[in-house]
């Protein structure tokens, strides 16, 4: 195994391969900064070029681009509140409020450094877990996968406000998200639901226009209403030290970063779950790390921990995502689905062969993730100061550009006018949610998890009747879910008890 | 999905830069133009379209550039509708057909806005048989052994309309096999994964996909449809296993899409001489050694079918007497 690891490092470091990786990264840079235009779109565009490459070269080229996108996507999330990628939406929750408070540099530093740590952990886990990965993935049947989605939904308790009112609002939004996910072709019977006679809705609402509408449009409207720069009238922070502060934050909360990276890898490994889910679980975990209710209330208003969690997670999940793709041919996300096409063109079959006969190709992917991330973060850190200054530019100058990018990005989802309507509609809805204090994260979480939950619940019952409820893993996951739900209440009680002891 | 815009911009750029020079009166129509191949989704059809796009241009006078445009939506109906009526009949837009849309036309699905019989067919890169496979650790070596055992097996499917669903369904209805269908897996690879963790027992897919799994030792092939595939010729054909005439007919019609295979077409109304020229170019491209090497590497077996063969197979699918159509609707639904 060590031989293969070393061999593949040399394969990557060959001049041609390395140059191709750099080229891919260059493309990734330009795309990652555009909201909505994700790695999947670019990867599809790059496919024609790989016909004449060797597998190692092709994957260096494609993954080099891909790993940059997850990192740079965080940048627009922080600066404009516009998720640069579907998987970067959770960074908006605390990253953008930090930018509004004039701490854009610190938020960016934290996002990038945690991304790097996350990517390294993800790659390390990928490398180490290769011998045991098949039995691990195979131990998760449909019932277990259903319980994982339930655990994801349970995170809503942490994503909504405290108290009965906040929780009620969070759960109603989560349920509404579940309802929205039922639009389109039902997988089991092929029936169309809520399609309103539109072919556009056959495959359901697309995540990109939906998410960009919910998160980005309200921020832009808000910026226009305020009529100031993003950072308001605040004094210019000393940007260089801001970035440095963010880097320090990563190490101040190092264990949080490690735990969130682990969440990213684990959720990434599960076939079908993907980055859309992992980021929210990581964010929820960051919120759970709050020591008490007052500490918890800082989240959503610009707490650096809310940036570190999803930042680390959405890069570590890249390593995790590759596992089901490489070992089973089951893509973990949109981009890895396209990566599968590259496997076919290269004449490689995802499956056990990738872990034995073509192990060096698999390891070369791990190395690409590592090297590309280090280079990206180094380059980004040099330019961050200039980027952070954008938050001091008058809103009127920023809004037209960002709006254009938002709608362009949404339009790439299906190249349909309907994409723009969905973005505008969701934007309006999102604005009122923000205005009246309804949490947006549970809505998106419900939407992302809905289809998965339905699929696996149906299969579990169709296959096992109700026997699946007695499977040991299902019971363990059920107890974990209960714990996730109860955590905020436990924290609340602990705080009260502490207060009463103080009073004595 | 999101690639479309970027592709669109590239097309615009390509047409601007390449098409800028004034074409002289004698210049071939395709000189300096860019052709588009519309395809409804990924998989073997997408890969074929990309391989064709790499080589077809060489054989067309004027050597146009060719790009592949993915148009997801409506289980390939959107792309087919687009090529039928939205695209201009100028021979610049090709359709990489997913022949399953023929079933949609036969079932009179509302969203169908095309008639496959009217497309200008260029040929096909080959039919692809459909094969039923079971887990290797099960005691049944053949379909007959299983049928005689009277036991029930669980078939994983991606939903009605898919090979994974329809073929076991028809075998249960008309050939005395006991298959319990568990539908809803997102894709074929998810069924294969479920097969490995013993959640399901049987899986039906194109011969190309099943061959890969058989070579890996994860499944054993037991039944095929009428379209033969190298290495699977020995398997019993589903139609021969049917116990009655109706079942045999329905299975025959259900096999028609795999006989058509990965066919390419131009919009109806394209000038006849241009269609003829494209047909010749397609036939020549299919002999190109580089194209065949790319196809072999991608493990998508290319086997040229002439435009006449494609048209004949399309008719065999779509032209059904009303009574057969009525019976089919009971068992087969269009889906992805």
Image (cartoon, coloured by chain):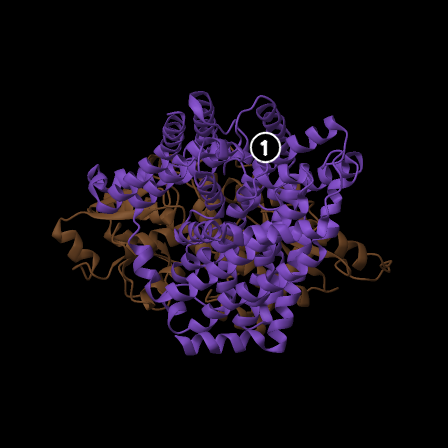
Chain colours: A purple, B brown
Does residue A403 show up?
Answer: yes
User: Of helix, strand and loop, which one carries label 1?
Assistant: helix
- Going 33% across and 36% down the picture, which residue do you hit? B327
Q: Nearer the viewer, residue A181 or B322?
A: A181
Question: What residue did someone put label 1 on?
Answer: A214
Query: Local crowd at mark 1 within 10 Å, few (<14), some, or many (≥20)?
Result: many
Q: Is residue A47 above or below residue A447?
A: below
- On the image, the x and y values in percent for residue A149 come to 38, 40
Q: Which of A186 and A315 is in front in this view?
A: A315
Q: In which quarter of the image is residue A4?
A: bottom left
Chain of the residue displaying label 1: A
Q: Is residue B230 above or below residue A494?
A: below
Q: Which of B292 and A500 is in front in this view?
A: A500
Q: Taking B20 as reference, is A411 left or right?
A: left
- Going 51% across and 75% down the picture, which residue do you hit? A9
- On the image, the x and y values in percent for residue A429 come to 59, 25
Q: Taking B37 as reference, is A330 left or right?
A: left
Q: Quadrant of residue A427?
A: top right
**Quarter of the C terminus of chain A within the rendering:** top left
Q: Which of A161 and B71 is in front in this view?
A: A161
- On the image, the x and y values in percent for residue A253 come to 50, 50
Does residue B91 show up?
Answer: no
**Quarter of the N terminus of chain A within the rendering:** bottom left
């Amino acid at each position: 195994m060590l031989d293969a690891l070393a061999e593949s490092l040399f394969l990557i470091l060959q001049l041609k391969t390395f140059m191709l990786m750099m080229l891919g990264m260059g493309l990734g840079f330009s795309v990652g900064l555009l909201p909505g235009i994700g790695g999947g779109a670019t990867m599809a565009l790059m496919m024609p070029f790989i016909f004449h490459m060797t597998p190692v070269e092709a994957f260096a080229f494609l993954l080099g681009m891909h790993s940059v996108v997850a990192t740079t996507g965080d940048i627009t999330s922080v600066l404009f509140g516009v998720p640069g990628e579907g998987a970067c939406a959770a960074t908006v929750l605390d990253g953008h409020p930090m930018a509004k408070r004039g701490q854009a540099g610190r938020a960016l530093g934290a996002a990038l450094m945690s991304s790097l740590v996350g990517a390294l952990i993800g790659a390390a886990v990928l490398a180490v877990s290769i011998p045991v990965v098949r039995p691990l993935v195979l131990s998760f049947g449909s019932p277990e996968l259903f319980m994982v989605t339930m655990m994801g939904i349970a995170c809503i308790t942490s994503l909504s406000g405290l108290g009965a009112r906040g929780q009620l609002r969070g759960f109603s939004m989560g349920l509404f998200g579940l309802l929205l996910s039922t639009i389109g072709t039902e997988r089991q019977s092929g029936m169309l639901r809520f399609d309103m006679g539109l072919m556009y809705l056959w495959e359901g609402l697309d995540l990109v226009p939906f998410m960009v509408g919910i998160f980005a449009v309200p921020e832009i409207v808000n910026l226009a209403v305020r009529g100031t720069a993003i950072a308001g009238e605040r004094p210019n922070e000393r940007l260089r030290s801001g970035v440095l502060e963010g880097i320090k934050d990563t190490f101040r909360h190092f264990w949080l970063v490690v735990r969130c990276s682990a969440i990213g890898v684990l959720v990434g490994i599960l076939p079908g779950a993907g980055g859309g889910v992992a980021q929210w679980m990581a964010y929820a975990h960051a919120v759970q790390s709050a020591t008490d209710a007052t500490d918890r209330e800082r989240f959503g208003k610009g707490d650096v921990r809310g940036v570190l969690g999803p930042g680390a997670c959405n890069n570590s999940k890249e390593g995790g995502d590759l596992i089901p793709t490489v070992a089973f041919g089951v893509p973990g996300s949109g981009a890895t689905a396209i990566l599968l096409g590259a496997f076919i063109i290269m004449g490689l079959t995802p499956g056990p062969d990738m872990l034995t006969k073509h192990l060096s190709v698999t390891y070369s992917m791990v190395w690409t993730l590592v090297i590309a991330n280090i280079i990206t973060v180094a380059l980004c850190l040099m330019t961050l100061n200039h980027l952070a200054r954008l938050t001091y530019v008058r809103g009127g100058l920023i809004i037209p550009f960002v709006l254009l990018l938002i709608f362009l990005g949404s339009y790439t989802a299906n190249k349909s006018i309907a994409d723009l309507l969905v973005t505008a509609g969701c934007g309006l809805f999102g604005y009122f949610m923000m205005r009246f204090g309804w949490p947006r994260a549970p809505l998106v979480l419900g939407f992302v998890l809905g289809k998965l939950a339905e699929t696996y619940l149906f299969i579990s019952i169709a296959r096992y009747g109700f026997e699946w409820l007695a499977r040991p893993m299902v019971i363990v996951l059920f107890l974990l879910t209960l714990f996730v739900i109860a955590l905020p209440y436990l924290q609340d009680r602990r705080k009260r008890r502490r207060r009463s002891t103080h009073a004595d | 999905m999101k690639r479309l815009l970027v592709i669109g911009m590239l097309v615009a750029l390509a047409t601007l830069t390449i098409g800028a020079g004034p074409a002289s009166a004698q210049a071939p129509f395709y000189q300096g133009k860019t052709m588009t191949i519309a395809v409804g989704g990924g998989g073997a059809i997408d890969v074929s379209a990309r391989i064709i796009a790499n080589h077809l241009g060489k054989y067309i006078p004027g050597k146009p550039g060719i790009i592949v445009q993915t148009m997801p939506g409506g289980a390939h109906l959107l792309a087919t509708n687009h090529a039928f009526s939205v695209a201009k009949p100028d021979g610049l837009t090709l359709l990489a057909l997913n022949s399953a849309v023929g079933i949609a036309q036969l079932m009179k699905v509302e969203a169908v806005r095309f008639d496959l019989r009217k497309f200008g067919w260029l040929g096909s890169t080959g039919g692809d048989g459909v094969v039923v496979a079971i887990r290797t650790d099960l005691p049944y070596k053949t379909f007959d052994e299983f049928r005689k055992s009277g036991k029930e097996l669980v078939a994983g499917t991606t939903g009605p309309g898919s090979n994974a669903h329809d073929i076991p369904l028809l075998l249960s209805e008309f050939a005395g096999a006991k298959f319990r269908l568990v539908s809803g897996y997102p894709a074929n690879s998810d069924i294969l994964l479920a097969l490995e963790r013993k959640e399901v027992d049987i899986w039906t897919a194109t011969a190309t996909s099943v061959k890969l799994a058989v070579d890996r030792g994860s499944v054993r092939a037991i039944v095929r449809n009428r379209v033969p595939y190298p290495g699977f010729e020995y398997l019993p054909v589903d139609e021969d296993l049917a116990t009655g005439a109706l079942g045999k007919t329905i299975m025959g019609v259900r096999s028609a899409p795999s006989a058509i295979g990965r066919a390419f077409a131009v919009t109806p109304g394209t000038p006849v001489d241009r269609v003829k020229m494209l047909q010749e170019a397609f036939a020549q491209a299919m002999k190109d050694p580089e194209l065949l090497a790319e196809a072999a590497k991608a493990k998508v077996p290319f086997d040229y079918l002439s435009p006449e063969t494609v048209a004949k197979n399309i008719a065999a699918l779509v032209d059904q007497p009303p009574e057969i159509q009525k019976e089919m609707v009971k068992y087969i639904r269009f889906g992805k």
